[in-house]
Amino acid sequence: MTARSARRPWRRAAAWLALLGPLFYATYGFANWWAASRAQVPTAAFAWERGIPFWPWTIFAYWSINVFYALSPFLAHDRHTLDRHVFRLLTATVLAVACFLLWPLRFGFGQPAVTGAPAFLFDALRGFDQPFNQAPSLHIALAVILWDWYRRLLRARWARAVLHAWAFAICASVLTTWQHHFVDIPTGALLGLVCVWLWPLERVVSPLRGWRLARDPQRWMLAALYAAAAGALLAAALHLDSFALWLGWPAASLALVAANYAALGERGFQMDGSGRMRWAARWLFGPYRCAAAANAWAWTHRSPASVEVLPGLRLGKLPTGAQWQAAGRPRLVSLCAELQVPHAAAAGGARCVPMLDLVVPPPRRLRRAVAAIEAQRRAGEAVWVCCALGVSRSAATVVGWLRLHGLPGATGAAAEARVRSARPQTVLRAAWRTAIDRATDPGFPPAAASNRPLQERTP
């Protein structure tokens, strides 16, 4: 046994599994009993689903998730990773069962008779399962969580390819074994993504731990607008039915954006220090990000991507990969919480100090962004400071940098005038000027140039 394997939290993993197993069967079974006791339980299915073939042999893939599930806690390298993984599994179970109790659904048509080897597994499944507990599919949610868990453990390309193929087979089997209807799959995937987003395996504060109700009225106004839009989309999805149900994805995305403005802050978007989002956040906020990118293009496509404020310092919108290459591959400083920097730019040393759009950040965050510009400048290369439009977050940060470093001793008005002369469309209102004054005050505590997420204490 290697020293690393000896340090694995074997006993803790066994204890967690001893809790997870009974909890799953107890809650899942209770939800089945609850639905069976109802006089009427509706079905959510499309007519075309009757054309889905019934392949009994895919029950082997369906059942294989139990092996992946039971083995996964014992593969954790430390207590932190183990606990976060278990929290994902627990959250998926609790939220799915809550949905089963609140909105019970049943499978719309029975399974044909099965013979041969698959018959044993179907009989075992029917021993505790019933044609209820449909949406969101807990099977799909767990498959998403377990796929993310195992892909981190595998390094060989062939092994990852096998994992991807087998995960797809598990997800497809919920249809080919006639256990679930189609609508259960995207809702289950959404649940799995939420669990991965809620409990990042990295040593960073989870969104739940970072929950702080905003005090800024502007943030609450924006949160209310996004929540109203999410509600309208959800209502349309439920009312129009059919393929309009896909509107549930942007509804969920905007609901999470509303939560970010109301309490989670920039951390809810899970942007790292190089300007890239974690994969679950990219999918959850996908509709919002597409809308934000389209909005940025609509406002900026007729303007230069960036302008030079001082030699070696550029100010502008978040560039595309081609625009970044054409500018000579400068070092980026992004202030976007919602949009990623190009992958090549992130690999080339980009820095990100995320700020919420349409909101004036705290002076400390603005000071940190100024420090990030100075750190990039000291690398001896050109720097491009950017946000979605390049008119507020990035402009305010450049004004702050000019006052502290670029034009030492310059007044706020002089620094702002320098920025406006280069980029006339700059929008800085009184609240921005107040934040800049506080961030550049000589008595203000200096900020670290890095933007590392808040760390968890090592257990």
Image: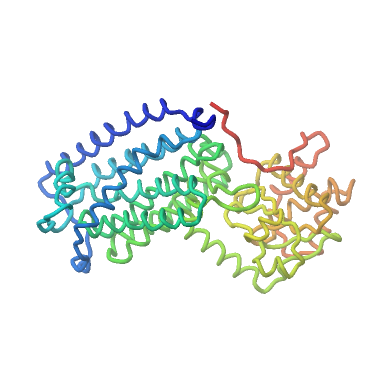
For residue 84, above or below residue 280:
above
Q: Is 23 or 250 nearer to us in this picture?
A: 23
The answer to whether residue 150 is left or right of residue 375 is left
Q: Extreme front residue here?
A: 1
Tag count in the figure?
A: 0
Name the residue: 30% across, 59% down: 172
- Position in image of residue 236 (x %, y %): 34, 61
Name the residue: 57% across, 47% down: 218
Name the residue: 61% across, 47% down: 272
Q: Quadrant of residue 173?
A: bottom left
Q: Is 84 or 103 nearer to us in this picture?
A: 84
The answer to whether residue 331 is left or right of residue 459 is right
- Position in image of residue 313 (x %, y %): 81, 58
Q: Is 223 or 110 nearer to us in this picture?
A: 110
- Position in image of residue 141 (x %, y %): 35, 48
Coloured how? Answer: rainbow
- Position in image of residue 259 (x %, y %): 48, 45
Q: Is 260 or 381 nearer to us in this picture?
A: 381
The answer to whether residue 380 is left or right of residue 360 is right
